[in-house]
Image (spheres, coloured by chain):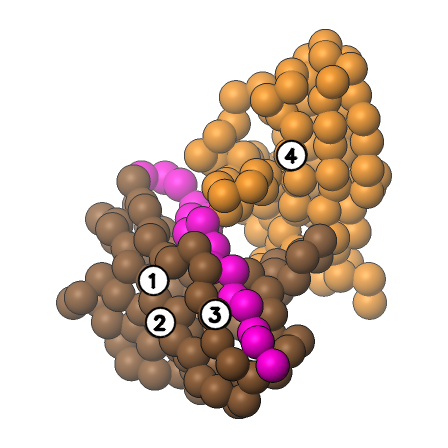
Chain colours: A brown, B orange
């Protein structure tokens, strides 16, 4: 099976930079994704890393290291609207199954 | 474009009742999924479909059935609802294996009393 671990809560200051870590265990996977979910809303796709390294999309960047079974989401120039839950998710392969396995989510609190 | 539409948005059921949740997408996506989200548990995959006429079990399939008779629709059925099925249900769709991300519906909040 697959499992992902991420911190349950992170607090940061408006305008600062924050990193949300994700460690995982899996026997095989295509890549690591990140999703954002505001309270009461639907998850929205942020980024996908198929290969090791950094992917940048505006203020958000995501990193993957397959050798360390580790990834992170980096948010820069934090804004109050970034207060949300962030989920890492593995697109796993093998075993005849398909789909994303999600971590339990990190609640990001932005303070003024 | 509407994207992924789920109906209903809210529902209260009595234990033992049945219901069907409807998911419709207008993006011509092959893959569709049903997840449930419970506090502190993240999203867990119930069933999924890789194309019209196909369905498969996910991580937590017990107590649920699905059908994909048309490419744009994916139905989730509860034959005999139980309080443990109280949850928020999300439908999602994707074009391929996840590079472009999943598009989620706005969710159905189901309470079983």
Q: CA distance from mark 4 to mark 3?
A: 27 Å
Q: Quadrant of residue A55?
A: bottom left
Subunit bearing disc 1: A
Q: Residues within 10 Å of mark 3 (few under 14, many from 20)?
A: few
- Would you call the spot at circle 2 few (<14 residues within 10 Å), some (14-19), or many (20 or more)? many
Q: Residue furthest top?
A: B16
Q: Is residue A16 visible?
A: yes
Residue depicted at x 32% and y 47%:
A3
Q: Which mark is residue B87?
A: 4
Q: Nearer the viewer, residue A24 or A31?
A: A24
Q: Which residue position holds label 2?
A: A72
Q: Secondary structure at mark 4?
A: strand
- The Cα–Cα distance between marks 4 and 1, rounded to whole angstroms, is 25 Å
Residue at the extreme front: A112
What chain letter is assigned to the residue under label 2? A
The residue located at (56%, 74%) in the rendering is A110
Same chain for the residues under marks 4 and 3 in the image: no
In whole angstroms, how far apart are the C-alphas of marks 3 and 1? 16 Å
Residue B32 higher or lower than A78, as above or below: above
The picture places residue B100, in percent across and down from the top left corner, at 53, 69
Label 4 in the same subunit as label 1: no
Q: Nearer the viewer, residue B28 or A83?
A: A83
Residue B35, compared with residue A8, is above or below; it is above
Q: Which residue is mark 1?
A: A22
């Amino acid at each position: 099976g697959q499992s992902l671990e991420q911190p349950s809560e992170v607090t940061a200051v408006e305008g600062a930079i924050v990193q949300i870590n994700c460690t995982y265990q899996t026997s095989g996977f295509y890549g690591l994704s990140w999703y954002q979910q505001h309270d009461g809303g639907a998850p929205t796709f942020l980024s996908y890393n198929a290969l090791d390294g950094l992917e940048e999309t505006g203020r958000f960047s995501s990193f993957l290291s397959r050798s360390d079974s580790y990834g992170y989401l980096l948010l820069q120039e934090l804004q109050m609207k970034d207060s949300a839950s962030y989920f890492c998710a593995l697109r796993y392969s093998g075993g005849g199954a398909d789909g994303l396995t999600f971590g339990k989510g990190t609640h990001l609190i932005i303070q003024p | 474009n509407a994207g992924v539409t789920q109906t209903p948005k809210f529902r209260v059921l009595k234990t033992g009742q049945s219901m069907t949740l409807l998911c419709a997408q207008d993006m011509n996506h092959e893959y569709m999924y049903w997840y449930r989200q419970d506090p502190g548990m993240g999203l867990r995959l119930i069933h999924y479909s890789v194309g019209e006429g196909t369905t498969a079990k996910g991580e937590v399939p017990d107590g649920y059935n699905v059908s994909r008779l048309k490419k744009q629709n994916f139905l989730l059925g509860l034959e005999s609802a139980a309080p443990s099925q109280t949850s928020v249900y999300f439908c999602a769709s994707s074009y391929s294996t996840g590079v472009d991300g999943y598009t989620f519906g706005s969710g159905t909040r189901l309470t079983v009393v």
